[in-house]
Image (spheres, rainbow, N blue to C red):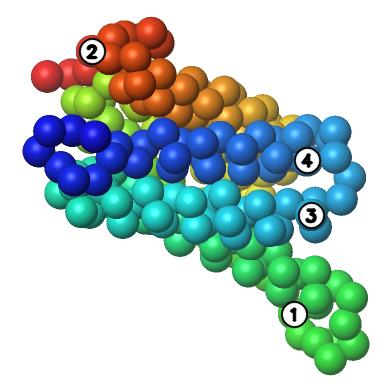
């Protein structure tokens, strides 16, 4: 906990959720997991609920950057899980027979989230190098998803971007936990790129 806040630093928790869900999605996208359906609960809980909780905790801490980032990406993962569920139901149910699904929806969603992530990336450049790297990798995820949908880039590209993001988020989470717990820098996060 910081001295001026009754709420503990939520970044470790939020980044852990991000790390695990992007690990699972990346493993699926590069072809090491065949059944993505079992990723749905993890997307809802780790991608969605965990990051929403971290965001709400950051609102209490009056950290508008963290609150906006975690809350927004929490909502993103919940929406993705619901989208995947609808696609799964549509593929396996006769009650939606004749309903047309536009496969470009995810591409347009990726573009919208890329726009949001670009200005969040700019803001992260003033915080720490680790956070900036995490946001740059989120940019890469959305760029590769957009390119997958509209330019036919193989799904392995966003898969690799998800895996790189997972590694960075695990590091960021570990740095927050260990540096705070031990009261010294165990895992450096780096000074901001911009001041």
In the image, taking residue 135 as reference, residue 184 lies left or right, namely left
5 displayed left or right of 19: left
Residue hosting label 2: 191
> Circle 4 is placed at which residue position?
28
- Mark 1 — residue? 100
Residue for point 70% across, 40% down: 24
- Please tell me in which quadrant of the rendered image residue 130 appears: top left
First in residue order: circle 1 vs circle 4:
4
* Residue for point 46% across, 22% down: 174
Calculate the distance from the C-alpha at mark 2 to the C-alpha at mark 1. Answer: 49 Å
**Precedes in sequence: disc 2 or disc 3:** 3
Which of the 4 image quadrants contains residue 157?
A: top right
> Between residues 177 and 14, which one lies in front from this camera angle?
177
Numbered badge on residue 38: 3
Q: Earlier in the sequence, mark 4 or mark 3?
A: 4
Residue 41 in the image, given as x and y percentages of width and height: 68, 58
Quarter of the image with the C terminus is top left
Q: Earlier in the sequence, mark 1 or mark 3?
A: 3
Q: Nearer the viewer, mark 1 or mark 3?
A: 3
SS at mark 4 in the image? helix
- Residue 126 image offset from top left, x and y in percent: 19, 25
Q: Does any portion of residue 120 appear in the rendered image?
A: no
Q: Secondary structure at mark 2?
A: loop
């Amino acid at each position: 906990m910081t001295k001026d806040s009754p709420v503990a630093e939520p970044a470790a928790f939020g980044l852990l959720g991000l790390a695990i869900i992007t690990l699972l999605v990346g493993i699926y996208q590069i072809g090491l997991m065949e059944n993505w359906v079992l990723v749905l609960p993890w997307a809802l809980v780790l991608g969605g609920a965990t990051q929403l909780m971290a965001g709400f905790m950051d609102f209490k801490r009056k950290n508008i950057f963290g609150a906006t980032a975690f809350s927004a990406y929490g909502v993103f993962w919940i929406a993705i899980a619901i989208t995947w569920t609808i696609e799964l139901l549509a593929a396996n149910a006769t009650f939606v027979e004749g309903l047309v699904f536009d496969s470009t929806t995810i591409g347009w969603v990726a573009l919208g989230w890329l726009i949001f992530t670009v200005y969040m990336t700019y803001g992260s450049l003033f915080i720490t190098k680790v956070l900036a790297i995490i946001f740059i990798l989120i940019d890469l995820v959305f760029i590769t998803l957009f390119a997958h949908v509209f330019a036919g880039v193989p799904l392995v590209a966003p898969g690799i971007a998800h895996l790189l993001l997972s590694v960075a988020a695990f590091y960021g989470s570990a740095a927050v936990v260990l540096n705070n717990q031990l009261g010294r820098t165990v895992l450096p996060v780096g000074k901001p790129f911009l001041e």
